[in-house]
Amino acid sequence: MRQAGRSWLPRLGQYALVLWVAVTLNFAIPRLAPGNPALIMHTGEGDPTPEELAELGEIYGLNEPVLVQYGRFWLDLLRGDLGLSTDHNRPVTDVLLERLPWSLVLVGLGLIGAIIIGTLIGAWSAWRREAGRPSQDKGTLVGVLAIDSMPGFWVGMLLIAVFSAQLGWFPSYASAQMPEGTLAGIAESGRRLAMPLATMIITSFGTYYMLARASMTTVLGEPFIRLARAKGLPERTVAIRHALRTALLPIATNAAIAAGSLVSGAVVVETVFSYPGLGKVIADAVAVRDYPLLQGAFLLATLGVIAANILVDLLYPLLDPRVRHSREELPV
Amino acid sequence: MNSRMHSTAIPPRPVLEVADLTVRYGSRTVVHETDLILRAGETVALVGDSGAGKSTVAKAIAGLAMPEAGSVRLDVPRTGHEGAGGLDLLTASAADRRTARRAVHLVMQDPYASLPPHLRVLGIVAEPLVIHRIGRRGERGEAAREALRSVGLDPEQYGRRLPHELSGGERQRVAFARAIITRPAVILADEPTGMLDATLRAEVSDLMGALSREHGTAILHITHDLALAARTCDRIVVMANGRIVEQGRTREVLRSPQHETTRQLLAAALRGARTVGSARRVSEATAA
Amino acid sequence: MSRTLALWRSLPLTSRLGFTIVAALILLALFGPLLAPYDPIERVTTPFAPPSSAHLLGADDVGHDLLSVLILGARPSLLVALLAAVAATCVGMLVGISAGYLRGAVDTVLMRIVDVVLALPVVPLTLVVGVLAGPGLFTQTLVISIALWAPMARELRAQVLSVRERDHIHALRAMGAGHGYMLTRHIVPAVGTLVVPQLVLAVKSAVMLEATLAFLGLGDVSSMSWGMMLSIANERSAFLTDAWLWWVVPPGALIGLTVLGFALAGGAVERTAAGRTVRPTRRRKPAPASAASTALAQTAPEAPLLEVDQLTVRYGDGEAATGGCTGVDLVLPRGRVLGLVGESGSGKSTVAAALVGLMAPAAQVAEGGIRMDGTDLLVLGPRERRGLLGSRIGLVPQEAQSALNPVHRAGDQIAEAVLTHQDLTREQARARAQELLDLVGLPAHAFRSYPHQLSGGQRQRVVIATALANDPDLLVADEPTSGLDVLVQQDILDLLSSLRERLGLTMVIVTHDLPVIAHIADDIAVMQAGFVVEQGETLRVLASPDDPYTQRLVGSLPDMAEFEEVR
C-alpha cells in the first residue's frame, strides 16, 4: 500500500535510482556492444570512413578514460544536451520537445478514457457475479480478454480500413502542424485525434478492467458490505458509495504501473496513424538506426513513468484516510 | 520477580527451565524477564488475555522467535547433556539445537494451517522421524500407525487421507500424533482447541492429559480459557503484559486469586459457567 | 488414461478452450510446411490478387500466396515467444525463490533490481537494445526475456513469501528441519504448481511483444512472422485498399487468437477472489401456519414478536442441493432474548440470515415462513424487506469489528443508517448519531474518528449503535463476541444486557459459545446439522437437557462451582 508522509524519502531514492540506471544503461549499452561506438554517432549516408570514425571519436571523446566519458555524459545531460539526431541532424532535445505535446495529449486522454471505461465495466462485472449472475461476469471477462488480446497496431489498421477507407468518416492520418486556436481548428484536430485515441483506449482498457474487477471482488467479500446492507441501504448506494469507493484504492495504486504500458502502446498507434508524436519518432528512429534519438526517447519515457508514479503517490492520501491520519488510539 | 507463589509439594525433576526470558518485536518488548519451569509428567496452563505474551514464550522455546536475553535450558535424556542443568538452547551449537528439537514439540493453534497440504496423514505423522533420521522406512510407518492409534484415529481409515479431507478436530489429533512420535519430553500446545467446536475442546484437552500420563511428557497448555485450564492442568501460570503475575497449583490459584488479571479472567469464565452451575443446582434441588 | 481424462474434465471450460486453441496452433506450427499449399517465398501469382479458389487469401504486393505465408508464420511467431518465456521463467524462478526464501540482504538487493527493471518502460528499452543487437531471432528472444523476467520474479517471490509464512512451515522449523529439507520437500512443490500458469501467461505476453517488435522492424526478415506480415502490410498501406480484408485481418486475428488461447489456458478467468456474498432475499409464496407454532403462540398471552414456522432453506437446486436448515420452529415473545446456539454447519447462520433477509443468492426457501407481528416476511418484495432492515430489525453482523467502512468516519456511518429510514436533515441525523454513541458508551469525539483509529471493542460498539439507529423492535446479533479479547467480550455482553433493559429490546443472539449466552439469554434454541434439537427456557435446558447433543454440549462446560465462593 502506498504510504506518503514518513516514507517519501525512500521512495524518492528509489526513483532516483531508476533514473540513474536508465542513464547508465544509455551510456553503457553502446560501449558494450561489439564494434566501434562511434558508428552510432555517424550522421550522413553510407558507412563512415576510418578517418571520419577517428574524427567522431575525437568529438565525442571516445578515446578518453571511461570514467571521464561517464562524467561528461552526465554533465551534458544536466545541461539538457542529449546529443545529435543522426537522422534529423538536429539536437535530440529539440526533436523530442517538439513532439512531446502531441504524445502527452494522446497518452493522457487515452489513459483517462481507459481508466474510466475499464473501471466501470470491471466493477459492474464483479458486481453481477456477486449478485448471483456469474455467467454475465464470465462472458464479459472472456470478451474483454479477447479484445485485450488483439495487437494495437492491428486494431488501428482495422479502424482505418473500416472508418477511413471504406466509410470515409475519419481521416487516416493526423497532420503535422499544430492546430489553430480557432474552434474549427480544434474540431479538426479532434477529428484527427479520434481514431488514434479510440485505438489507445480499446487496447488499454482491458488492464484496468482486470484491476477493477479483482479489486471490487475483494471489497465485496469484506464484512462492511454486509453492514451496509444491514442498514437497509438500496443496492445502488451499497455498490457505489461503499463498494466502488473502497475498491478505488488498489486501482489507484496499480494505475501508475499500468501507465507505463500505455507509453509503449503509443509507439505502435502513432506509427499506424502517422501521428506526429514521440512514438512515431521512436519508430522512425528504429528504422534508420538513429541511436542518439532512441536513447533520448528512452530517457524521456522513463522520466514520464517516474512522474506518473510521483503523481499517484501525491494523490493517494486523498483517497485513503488510513494514510492521511496516523494511527492514534482514542482514549476510552 | 513479580509473581505470587502458592504452596507446592516436593517437585519432580525439571525438564525445561526458562530464565529471564526477554523477547522484543521491533521496539516493543513482548516478554519481560520471564521465568518458567516445567517438570516431567506435569501439565501447566499458561493463561492470559491476547497480547499477554504467552504465544511468544512458546515460540521462543520452540526456536521460532529470537529472544533478546535469557536462557532456555533443556534437561532431557538422549541430548547428550543430561544432568548438570542441561543444554541452553539459545547458546547451543546448531547441531545440538537440532537434536534438542526432538525433545521439544510445538503444536500450533490452527489445525487448518499446521499440516502440509500435499502429504498424506501417515507421512505427516512420520515426518519428525524423517527430519531427524530416526529409524528405517518400515519402522517409521509402524511408529506412525502406533501414534495415530494413541490419539484415537484408526490408521487403516485415516492413514492415506489428505488433510483437507479431515475435520478440524481430526486434524488436531493428527498434529498431536505427530507431536508424540519422537517421544518428546516437552510438548508446547499453543491454544490447541481455540479453533475447535466446544464439544471437541474437552476431548482434545483430555487427550493431552492422557498422553502426558502415559509417556511422562511435560505439557505447557497455552490458553485464554480458564475453564479449560481448570479442567486438566496441575499448575497454572498467569501472564499479563509480558510478565508472569501469578502462578501456583490450579485449585489454589483459582480459589483465591491474588492478581487483578486473574480475577478478571476468572470472572469471565464464571459468567457463563455460573448459570450452568446454578441451573444444575436448581434442578438437583427440585429433584431432591 | 482415465486419470488424464478426469483431470481434463476437472478444468474449467475456459481453460479447456484455451488449451484447445494452443494445441491447434502448436500443431499448425509443427506441420506448417506440410499444410501450406505453396512455397511462401515464390511468386506464384499476380500482386494484389484477390482471393480465389486457388489462393484462398489472395496475394501480397509481390505475388506470394498469403495463405501459405500465414500458415508458415506460425512457427516464428510461436518459437520466439516460447524460447523467451522459458528463459524468463528460469531467471525469474531463480531470482524469485532466492529472494523470497532467503530474505534479508539477498532479498533487498534482488528486489531493488527487479523494481528498477519494472520501472523502465518496456518497449523503448527493448528498442534501444534491439537496434544495437540488430534484427533477428536471437535479438528478439533476448529482448523479450529482458522484459518478462522481472514481473515473474516479483510474482514468484510473493508466492514463496506466502508459502513460507504458513503455519506448517513454522511447525517444520520448530521440529528442526533444515533449509534444504524444507526447500525440496515443501517450498518448491508448493510453488511449483504455480509456476506452470505463470509460464503460460509469460508466453502470452511474449507473443504480443514479438508481434510488436516485428511490426516495428526488429523481426527476423528471413522468417516471416505474423507481426512482420502486418509490418509489411502497413508499409504498403494495404489497409487503404480492399486488400485489408485478406492481408490485414488474418494475421492479426491469429495473433489475437494465440494470445487469448494462452491467456485462457493460463487460468486468467479463474483467478477470482473467494468471498461470501449475501443479497436481499427474493419474493416467495406464503405458507400456512403449522400447528406447532400456533400452539406455542397460544401459550403466551401477548402475541409474540417473531415466529419462525417450519423454515427450510436449501442451497443450490435439485440434486446438488445441500441443507441450510430444516423444519425450524421458533417463537420469540416481545422483550425476551433468544440464544441460538450451534457449532459450525448447524444452520444457525442460515436462520439468522433468513430473519434479516440477507441470504446468499444460492439459498432457496423450500418451505416455511417467518412472521413478524403477523406479517410473513418471506413474501415481501425486496424493497419492503429493505425497508424493515435497519428500521424495525437491526443487525449486528459477524466480525463486526471489521464491519465498518474504512474510508468513512464512524459518526457518518451511524448517521447514514439514520438517514436511510428517517426523513431528517443532516444536522438532525448527526445529533441522533451522537446520542447513539453516548448510548453505547463511546465518547463524543468518536464521531469524527475513522475505524482504524478505534480499538476492536470500540468498533463493535459503533456497529451496535448503527443497528440501534432507528429504534428497532428486534435486534439480531451474529456472533457478537467472537474475535474479541476475553475481557472485551465481557464488556460487550454487559452492554447488550444494559441496552436490553433500557430500550426493552427483543434480541436474537447467534453464537457457538454457550457460556456467552448462558447468562444473557432467557430462552435458548440449540441447533445441530440444520435442525433445532432442543429449545426452551435457558435455565431449564442447561439444568436438564433432553437431547443427547445438548447434553454433550452442556457437559463440555466445566462446573466451576468450587471457585465461586471466592471474594
Image: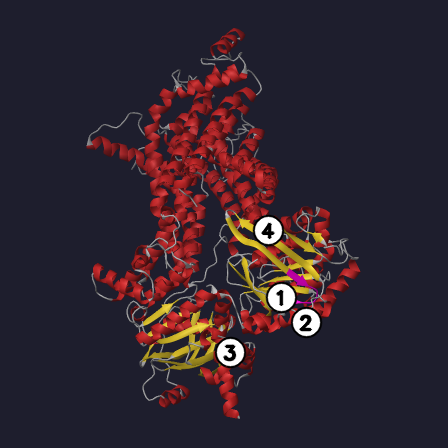
Q: CA distance from mark 3 to mark 1?
A: 24 Å
* The stretch drawn in magenta includes residue B20: no
> From which residue to which does the magenta span run?
B37-42
| Label 1 SS | strand
* Residue C199 point in image, percent of width and height: 57, 44
Q: Nearer the viewer, residue A250 or B152?
A: B152
Judged from this view, the residue extending furthest toward the bottom is B288
The chain identifier of the residue carrying mark 2 reads B
Q: Which mark is residue B65?
A: 4
* Residue at numbered disc 3: C565
Q: Is residue B200 visible?
A: no
**Label 1 is placed on what type of residue?**
Val
Q: Nearer the viewer, residue C23 or C520?
A: C520
* Residue at numbered disc 1: B44
Q: CA distance from mark 3 to mark 2?
A: 30 Å
| Label 3 SS | loop
| Label 4 SS | loop
* Residue at numbered disc 2: B210
| Label 2 SS | helix
- Kindly indicate the quadrant of the structure image that contains residue C361: bottom left
Q: Is residue A287 above or below residue C211?
A: above
Label 4, residues with CA under 10 Å away: few <14, some 14-19, many ≥20: some
A317 with respect to C552 (left or right): left
